[in-house]
Amino acid sequence: MSTYEDLSLAVQKGKKKLVEEYTKKAIDEGADATYILNDVLIDAMGKVGDSFSKGDIFVPEMLLAARSMKAGVDVLKPYLATGAAGAMGKCIIGTVAGDLHDIGKNLVVMMMESAGFEVVDIGVDISEDGFIQAYKENPDAKIIALSALLTTTMPAMESTVKKIKESDFADKVKVMVGGAPIDEKFAVQIGADGYAVDAASAAEKAKELVS
């Protein structure tokens, strides 16, 4: 098997040490860092995302794969052209006011980074103004992603989307929503630009929105 195949499998199996080892080996063999990032690491995480969406693997395996992939990216960073690791653009993400859940959000962060986004994670229990402020601090962001796990915080998600859509930067940014109680119908109803059922499809949807 080639180093690329070894590396891809190591990511898919969540073998962090092997991912570091094979990434270094690929660099030593003269491989282009951007190629390793896009065609091996991000591609491998795409396969992991597919397996997750089909129910063949679960959150723990996906987290391990995402962490191992990140270890590979860390090895590549010194070799990448500036910004290649955030080549898809910047995404602001947070859990809405009244909701302290972050496992789903953290998984989305990892998948977004794996897909080539630079992610600004503003945390949990974020007010409408918190999201607005985060955009003002990161005016180059292309996406604002809102997460909610509690049914009781769905109104907070709705009012936050409304506030973003009424802001003076509404035409410059896409709003994505997701979380256990959210569905496509609710996303459309509140005026979000995109909805994703899980972390893997969130990364795909984000790529779709910025392309």
Image (tube, grey):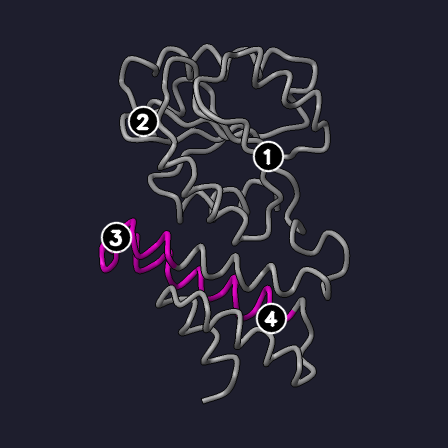
Image position of 166 with respect to 104: above or below: above
**Residue shown at 44%/17% (left/top)?**
125
Tag 3 near tag 1, CB within 8 Å:
no
| Farthest-out residue, right | 82
Magenta segment boundaries in residue numbering: 35-64
How busy is the neighbourhood of tag 2: few (under 14 within 10 Å), some, or many (20 plus)?
many
- Asked if the residue at tag 4 contacts the one at tag 1, i.e. Cβ–Cβ closer than 8 Å, the answer is no
Q: Could you tell which of marks 3 and 1 lies nearer the N-terminus?
A: 3
189 or 151: which is nearer to us?
A: 151
Q: Give the Cα separation between the discs numbered 3 and 4.
A: 26 Å
Q: Earlier in the sequence, mark 3 or mark 4?
A: 4
The residue identified by callout 2 is 182
Q: Give the residue number, with chain letter if any, for mark 3.
A: 58
Disc 4: which residue:
36
Residue annotated with mark 1: 120
Q: Please report the residue visible at 27 percent of the width from the left and 18 percent of the height from the top.
A: 151
Mark 3 or mark 2, which is nearer the start of the sequence? 3
Q: Name the residue rendered at 46%, 73% in the picture.
A: 18
Separation of marks 2 and 4 at Cα, in angstroms:
35 Å
Dot 4: within a 10 Å radius of its alpha carbon, few (fewer than 14), some, or many (20 or more) residues?
many
Q: How far apart are marks 2 and 3 (CA)?
A: 20 Å
Q: Is residue 186 magenta?
A: no
> Is 46 part of what is drawn in magenta?
yes
Magenta stretch, main secondary structure class: helix
For badge 3, the amino acid type reads: Phe
Q: Is residue 75 above or below residue 144?
A: below
Contact check, label 2 and label 4, Cβ < 8 Å: no
Q: What residue type is labelled 2?
A: Ile
